[in-house]
Amino acid sequence: MSTLFIVEQGAKLKKESRKFVVEKEGNLLLEIPEFKLARVFIFGNIQITTQAMKFLLENGIDTSFFNYYGKFIGRLIPVSSKNIPLRISQYKWHISEDLRLNISKILVCGKIKNSRNILLKYARNHPEVDFSKSTLEMLQLIESVSRKNGIPSLLGVEGRAAAIYFECFGKMILKNFTFANRKPRYPKDPVNSLLSFGYALLTNELFSALSARGFDPYLGYLHGAEYGRPSLALDLVEEFRQPLIDRLVLELINKDIIKPDDFEDIDNMIYLTGEARKEYLSHYERRMHTKISCDDKTLNYREIIHSQVEKFAKTILQQQEYIPFEIK
């Protein structure tokens, strides 16, 4: 099954017979059989015919819209899930301070473990770099989580761990890029731009998987409820940031796949140029299809995401312990 990324501005997505066609000004850009299409990501000024949209909705093909620069705008939503028992349990867990705190602790520990594992792995391959103090403090932060009695103090631990991690992250960048700190909202430098773009794609993946399972993606635990924020998707994104996006960004930079001149300044914010964005998406999709050992199975990352969502559903419905995905 294929993911279709459409980034050519002015292109049109059409449904013809048993295939999808992407064309621009009468010229064929791409065609793909309908049975091979799993999801569609659309960036910027792209048209979709009514026939194509109807087929995508009827067949539950995840279709997401981003602006030209990669900011998530919205999705085509078919008939909503009727999994009422799951949503009732999800709301009960949110209302219960103890349940919400407990699951939030698990999510924070999962994120910090993966951040620490990335640093440990890099240090093993680069003995000239010493991350020992950072990894020790992160281990101490993991141990401190059990003593926290509220979400604000837990977020304080998560914030401190993130600061330590991103300080080290800058030292893992080997090429002509600089990275001082993480600035999530408005990318002012190329590295933050690459991270933000990847996190937006990843959040959309979790949003889609949670919606398909029947969750309300907007009602989370660690991130809490805030108007318009997909808090549950952001909760589960945490365990995948480092193994998926951060490692992807390091690969793109350190292997000279993305270069400093592959960016443009638009209204004092830094974005990938059109061709570089295509390169990024190609490597993103390749990483999503990378297979690794997980739960005694060989799964690709997209399958692991759906597996984790299923585990989370069992936690909410059956109070089974949730174990975040951990990169080794």
Image (cartoon, grey):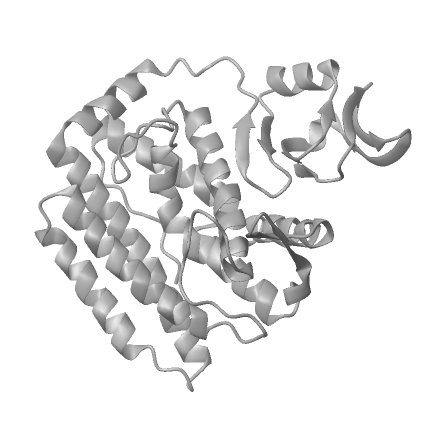
Residue projecting furthest to the front? 267
Q: Quarter-wise, where is residue 326 in the image?
A: bottom left
**Above or below: residue 257 compared with residue 32:** below
Residue occupying image coordinates x 34% and y 34% = 232
Residue 72 visible from this viewpoint: yes
Percent position of residue 148, x then y: 11, 50
Q: Nearer the viewer, residue 204 or 260?
A: 260
Residue projecting furthest to the right? 26
**Above or below: residue 174 compared with residue 141:** below
Residue occupying image coordinates x 64% and y 39% = 68
Percent position of residue 181, x then y: 40, 63
Q: Is 319 left, or right, of 10 in this rendering?
A: left
Residue projecting furthest to the bottom? 128
Number of numbered labels in the structure image: 0
**Above or below: residue 34 compared with residue 146:** above
**Above or below: residue 73 compared with residue 133:** above
Percent position of residue 18, x then y: 79, 21
